[in-house]
Amino acid sequence: MTTPKPASVEIRQHNAITTARYEMTACEMDIVFYLLSLIKKEDERGVMYQVKVRDLMAITGREWHYNQFLEATSNLRSREYIIEDEKRVLQVGLLASAEYIKGEGVIELEVSEKVRPYLIDLKNNFTSFRLHAAFSLTSKYAKRIYQIASQWKDIGESKTFSIHDLKVMLMLKDPKGKDPEQYTKLSMFKKFVLDTAVNQINAHTDLKISYELIKKGRSYQSIRFYINTQAPDQLPLPFDQPVENARHQHARQILDDLGIKDAKLIQQILSDEKLTDGMFKFNYELKTGRTKASKNPAGLLLKVLGLR
């Protein structure tokens, strides 16, 4: 009897949140993605969502420290979503509170009631994006553009954004002009934001995207994204399974991606928690460019782990 594959966990997020202007680090986004996977429509007011540090480490494959969580949740408490329509401008924070349970590695997060309808009321207007894909992206701009592209994946192309508006959404430009604009040269904006996002999204998610820059007169003023779906190489991250299963599944996928096929080596790494942690750390540093291994990353990993 064949065991069915676990379904991918989808995060569903109201389009008003997807297009809202806010700034988060990649670390903060991972906490938010995890939180969004826990939220259910039937949840009552005031429910506390438990984020287990070990679970998040297992799912993301990243090494987290207590101070990182303190800083990230403190920032999330003060981060401001700006949601605007024809009638109003809403300034709202995502979290009402964050409480650490000492000695248990647990954070309890409370969602602001003002933002809850945008996260839970999903009948007509929502974006869905896969949790494992969201965690796979290391660039914060890739994470944001992935969210935006997911909003248009059923249509095949996005609306036309002015470059000004997209930069505002990515917090690269202050709409009031008080703070200096980042990546003012188009070539730098393409290299460090657009092209980095496209490459990561196409390599690690269920979407394959491209973009078109549109001229008005002699200069480029607008951008449009083209979106197709693809079967991602990664296995889904099964939140409905025990954390150890998810951790091992993710670890196996990383080893497979690195080209490590030897069953004894795989078993040795997966059966030793320190080796598994070291493998996750190596993979994260490889993806973020802190470790360089273009020719033989598998060989370097085995050397780092002391297995060669």
Image (spheres, rainbow, N blue to C red):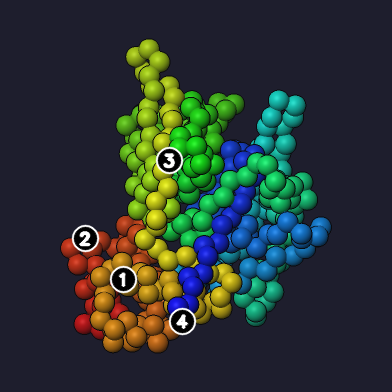
- How packed mark 1 is, by other alpha carbons closer than 10 Å (few <14, some 14-19, many 20 or more), is some
Residue to which mark 4 is pinned: 1
Question: How far apart, in angstroms, are the residues tagged by discs 1 and 2?
Answer: 16 Å
Give left or right: position of 283 versus 12: left
Amino acid of disc 2: Ser
Amino acid of disc 1: Asp
Question: How far apart, in angstroms, are the residues tagged by discs 2 and 4?
Answer: 41 Å
Residue 47 drawn at (x, y percent): 77, 63
Q: Are marks 4 and 3 in contact (CB under 8 Å)?
A: no
Residue to which mark 3 is pinned: 227
Mark 4 or mark 3: which comes first in sequence? 4
**Does residue 72 appear in the picture of this structure?**
no
Residue to which mark 1 is pinned: 256
Q: Is residue 158 above or below residue 2?
A: above
Mark 3 or mark 1: which comes first in sequence? 3
- How packed mark 3 is, by other alpha carbons closer than 10 Å (few <14, some 14-19, many 20 or more), is many
Q: Which mark is residue 284?
A: none
Mark 4 or mark 1: which comes first in sequence? 4
Q: Is residue 46 above or below residue 276?
A: above
SS class of the residue under badge 1? Answer: helix
Amino acid of disc 3: Ile
Q: Nearer the viewer, residue 155 or 244?
A: 155
Q: Which mark is residue 294?
A: 2
Question: How far apart, in angstroms, are the residues tagged by discs 4 and 3?
Answer: 37 Å
